[in-house]
Amino acid sequence: MVCIGCSCLDPDRSSGRWLPLSEKKTLRQIARPFVADPASGVCIRDRLKGLTPEDEKVLRMVGEHMGSLASRDLKARCADGLEHSMDTWAARKRELTAESSSRWAGSVTGATHAQWGLSRRAQFAHIQGLEAGTMIIRHRLSLPVGERGARKAPGGYRSAHEWFVKSRRLAALEDRLEWVRADREAGRVHVVRGGRKLANTRYNLTAAGLTEAQWRDRWEAARWFLSAAGESGKRYGNETIRVSPDGEVSVKLPAPLAELANSRHGRYTLAARVSFPHRGDEWRDRSSANQAVAYRIHLDVERDRWYLDASWTRKDLPVVLLDTLRSGGVVGVDMNADHLAAWHLDVHGNPVGEPRRFDYDLSGSANRRDAQLRHALTRLLHWAAGTGVQAIAVEDLDFTDSKSREKHGRKKRLRQLISGIPTGRLRSRLLAMCAEYGLSVIAVDPAYTSLWGDRHWRKPLTTKTRATSRHQAAAVAIGRRALGHPIRRRTAPPRAHQSDVHGHRTAQAGPGDRGREETRRPVTDRSQELHARTGNQRTRATSASKTVRDARSDRVDLHGHS
């Protein structure tokens, strides 16, 4: 028997059942918004035009020689594993110095440590993905076949055959997880200089459309090492690859190739000159002041072009407080798989003007996808800077556990949609480009932004001439959360004949109101508050009698006669 009127039960809309209030679903804790750290690194590129055949020959020889040393050093670092120390690092550097130079050896060992650390982080992320996959499979295998899943929890498998196949996959994932964990405990990492993808292409040249000679050229160019770290206080900020403010490029040759030098002190000066059209003035100021600038020379085999990259670190970035950024309003941005939905909000959280949509197409090569993102972000930031805001609000998305195919089962389109959202690349691009426009990035918790934006803001913002989309409403929700305002609006009170005549009207909850981001307690939960305050005894002060006899006796006592 279900006591529908009792305060101990409440309906659960997702399952259609009545659940105790202690078992009712609650909203998860929403994290506070924060200001994302701006990108402190700068990298620019220019083409080395006018190289002579002798220049290209020297660059190939230096890259091949230093690449072999880098491969050998990486192998030694991987062999050291967790037993690495400053003594082993110094021993490796002394060995490399004898075959190159002290600065070349420092650049090689620094790149080796960066590569080893990146591999360790990727290994840890791989372990997390395997753990999430095995946990979901175990959960689904424990359910009866055909059982439907909840909103955020997958159900059982559809058939006994699928259950059997997934049980075998669970065994394979557990075996792989055990193998990766053993590697991590032993400090072993698996690194391929030149890239594992390019290495595997060697065994499938027909599908890649390459010949063996073309693949060999790409493989060798990818394994060359022509990078040099900068040094402050040295001439033009780099002694190994020196670039003067007027664009002259010279390379310090390794000891075995010193006879190829065409300049003093064992240096080779290239015939090509660089100018760096983008941010060239900033680069010339650093080079003239002898501040550290790192350089990298590389060859694009497909285009047969040589390029020079210059990079440095900016340490004078200002730190802006969150309250200061909120003072001018924000631009809320909702990131999607094919576009960015944006809306300008004032300091009070009200949408201003019309929403904006910035499309991009992420099909094709990696370079084309990156260009599409940069073009969309350029249009977004140009418009945001024109609105006068100081910050852009985005969701702190990751989707680490949502990309697993074990969680979504046969929902292939959903998995492709989640995986297609370029969260990592877009976040890094946005931070780097916002620094150039003088804007900051406020990251907010992504919980319920699309749901509440669609429920509370899509309909009020829809007019006869404007159809507000779900993503544009989510942009409003993101912006309001970044400003510190609640997303959800209070609901209208019941009708006069169904409740206490009039309650609070439909309005926005104040910033200091308790439970402003939570649902109102059900009426059955508040029905006993009166008895809790006055006790169980009924009095005339708390409740008037509804009988005719009591009403007459009241009138008699009031006037003093019957």
Image (tube, rainbow, N blue to C red):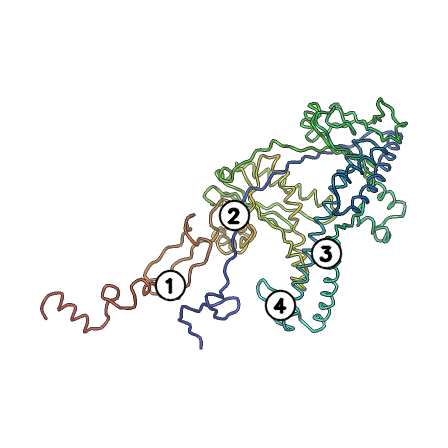
Give the labeled residue for mark 4.
155
Secondary structure beneath dot 2 equals: loop
Q: Residue at x 52, y 43 (%)?
A: 344
Q: In the image, 557: left or right of 499? A: left
> CB under 8 Å between callouts 4 and 3?
no
The numbered mark, 4 or 3, whose residue comes first in the sequence reads 4
Q: Where is residue 323 in the image (x, y as percent from the top left)?
A: 49, 39
Measured Cα–Cα span from mark 4 to mark 3 = 29 Å
Measured Cα–Cα span from mark 2 to mark 1 = 30 Å
What number is the disc on residue 181?
3
Given residues 168 and 190, the one toward you in this image is: 190
Q: Which residue is drawn at 83% across and 51% down?
A: 201
Given residues 513 and 206, the one toward you in this image is: 513
Mark 3, residues whose alpha carbon is within 10 Å: few (<14), some, or many (≥20)?
some
Q: Residue at x 82, y 28 (%)?
A: 252
Q: In the image, 364: left or right of 507? A: right
Secondary structure beneath dot 4 equals: loop
Residue extending furthest front? 87
Which amino acid does the dot numbered 2 rest on? Arg
Which amino acid does the dot numbered 4 rest on? Gly
The numbered mark, 2 or 1, whose residue comes first in the sequence reads 2
Give the labeled residue for mark 1.
526
Q: Residue at x 80, y 34 (%)?
A: 105
**Between tags 3 and 2, which lies in front?**
3
Measured Cα–Cα span from mark 4 to mark 2 = 32 Å
Give the labeled residue for mark 2.
32
Q: Where is residue 206 in the image (x, y as percent from the top left)?
A: 86, 53
The numbered mark, 3 or 2, whose residue comes first in the sequence reads 2
